[in-house]
Image (cartoon, helix red, strand yellow):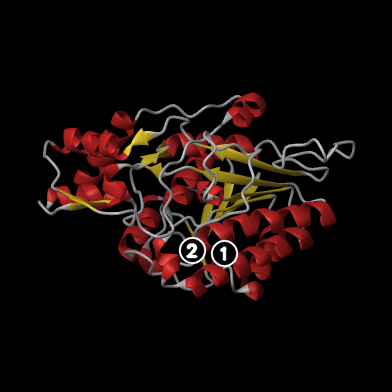
Amino acid sequence: MKILITGTAGFIGMHLAERLLERGDEVIGLDSINDYYDVNLKYGRLAKTGIPKEAISYGKVVQSEKYPKYRFVQLKLEDKEGLFDLFAKEGIDKVVNLAAQAGVRYSLTNPDAYIEANIVGFIHILEACRHYRIKHLAYASSSSVYGSNTNMPFSTSHNVDHPVSLYAASKKSNELMAHTYSHLFGIPTTGLRFFTVYGPWGRPDMALFLFTKAMKEGRPIQVFNYGNMQRDFTYIDDIVEGVIRVVDSPPIADPNLDLGKADPSVSKAPYKVYNIGNSKPEKLLDFIHAIEESLGVEAIKDMLPIQPGDVPATYADTSALERELGYKPDTPIKVGVGKFVDWYNSYYQ
């Protein structure tokens, strides 16, 4: 199986590429390597998969020095011509689209980046999948689509028409766009609503990274909503296992489905949406305590009000993932945080 993974200089993309390569798949990696956060970390992830920084130039396919079945190309999803050229040359079977402009707060000041990467870029992916007869498109959605929904746990049967950030709106748009292409062109598509992913090689703009860095440097950490936040923290290995099971199980069209009674996460078209989360919301202060234990230091907490675009709690209902694909994420935060801190201390020593 030849699989294109977009976003392989990113956190989830790097881990997913390694897992697929280790089981014998051929992988084409793609990333724009933008400067939303420290590009050195992105080049570090690429180096871990055998792609040296000095070999990378825009549009050039680079062979991994570590994995014989891995090649990487720096490319923007907004570059339709470059993307179509890649699909035409490579004979790709399946696509996992993880490339996106991430972050809730960044969308408040840089909205154009979300339209370009998450909307324009995604339509180019869909068009490429259509024209080159891709067997399955799995793509990153987000728990943020649940927006101001207060029904817990968040279920794919719930209404998600009230996003509270442009990032969330762009991810909901991806689900709608994917359904349209599944319906019109029969492309199997699966949306993956990730819940607060963390672990080694994680993003520097995420709480775990920010807290760890500040605590090691003896600086205060910003604790929003005065600590009254809950998040369904999900360890990276659990996310990757869920993604792989989804990739291996393309949705099948069901022309007899009664849409009047059906869950909105399914369709008559070959379309599906899953939550991938730990199904165990943790208090933010407990998460901070796990970091304190791993570092052996006490955090200096700057208690602040909730920020625009944030939601007080997330909690994943993963019953569909368990029922249909036989998988339930379960890594405890103490274990996952400990592994992150070990990586952080090693990488930044």
- Dot 1: within a 10 Å radius of its alpha carbon, few (fewer than 14), some, or many (20 or more) residues? many
Q: Residue at x 55, y 32 (%)?
A: 317
Q: Residue at x 53, y 37 (%)?
A: 276
Q: Secondary structure at mark 2?
A: loop
Q: Position of residue 316 (x, y in %)?
A: 51, 35
Closest to the observer: 212 or 52?
A: 212
Mark 1–mark 2 distance (CA, rounded to whole Å): 6 Å
Residue designated by label 2:
101
Closest to the observer: 275 or 343?
A: 275
* Res 79 quadrant in image: bottom right
Residue designated by label 1:
118
**Which numbered disc, 1 or 2, marks the residue that appears first in the sequence?**
2
**348 sits to left or right of 185:** left
* Res 198 quadrant in image: top left
The reply to whether residue 325 is in sight is yes
**220 sits to left or right of 191:** left
Asked if the residues shown at circle 1 and circle 2 are in contact, with their CB atoms under 8 angstroms apart, the answer is: yes
Number of numbered callouts drawn: 2
